[in-house]
Image: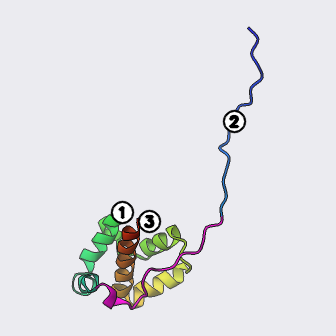
Amino acid sequence: LAMASQTVITVQPQFSAAQQPGVWQTGLMDCCSDCGVCLCGMFCFSCLGCQVAGDMNECCLCGSSVAMRTMYRTRYNIPGSILEDFCSMWYCAPCALCQLKRDIKRRREMGIF
């Protein structure tokens, strides 16, 4: 039997599409848009951190970290820098964590989380 010459594909073709820049669904100080999240962030910061970590399938201890905020921002192509993430978490950790939780909730509601 003679074998016909076949092209063997060894590399998956890549599709490149320009990803649109994302935005935070709420502002850093937009606590009134979800008072439940705001109260949880102010009075039980570690509980909210664990909720955020759980939402993102990460260790409970890293929910309120700069790395978590950076990873989330990168995943949704939200402009910013690690320095901005650090400053947000350092100077206003409850607000930054609440913003992250509100964003997760909104993206879930829109079906894009």
Q: Secondary structure at mark 3?
A: loop
Q: Tell me which amino acid carries mark 1.
A: Glu
Of 64 and 55, nearer the camera is: 55
| Residue 94 percent location from the top left of the image | 33, 86
Which of discs 1 and 2 lies nearer the camera? The answer is 2
Q: Give the residue drawn at x 24%, y 86%.
A: 39
Q: Are marks 1 and 2 in contact (CB under 8 Å)?
A: no
Q: Which residue range is magenta in the image?
A: 18-34
Q: Tell me which amino acid carries mark 2.
A: Ile
Q: How far is the residue under mark 2 from the one under mark 3?
A: 33 Å
The residue lying furthest to the front in this view is: 110
Q: Secondary structure at mark 1?
A: loop
Task: Name the residue that disc number 3 marks.
Answer: 112
Quarter-wise, where is residue 6 in the image?
top right
Task: Name the residue that disc number 2 marks.
Answer: 9
Which of discs 3 and 1 lies nearer the camera? The answer is 3
The quadrant the C terminus occupies is: bottom left
User: Is 30 within the magenta?
Assistant: yes
Q: Give the residue drawn at x 28%, y 76%.
A: 48
The chief SS type of the magenta part is: loop
| Residue 7 percent location from the top left of the image | 74, 30
Q: Tell me which amino acid carries mark 3.
A: Ile
Mark linked to residue 58: 1
| Residue 103 percent location from the top left of the image | 40, 76
Q: Are marks 3 and 1 in contact (CB under 8 Å)?
A: no
Q: Tell me which label, 1 or 2, sits earlier in the chain.
A: 2
Q: Tell me which label, 3 or 1, sits earlier in the chain.
A: 1
Q: Residues within 10 Å of mark 2 (few under 14, many from 20)?
A: few
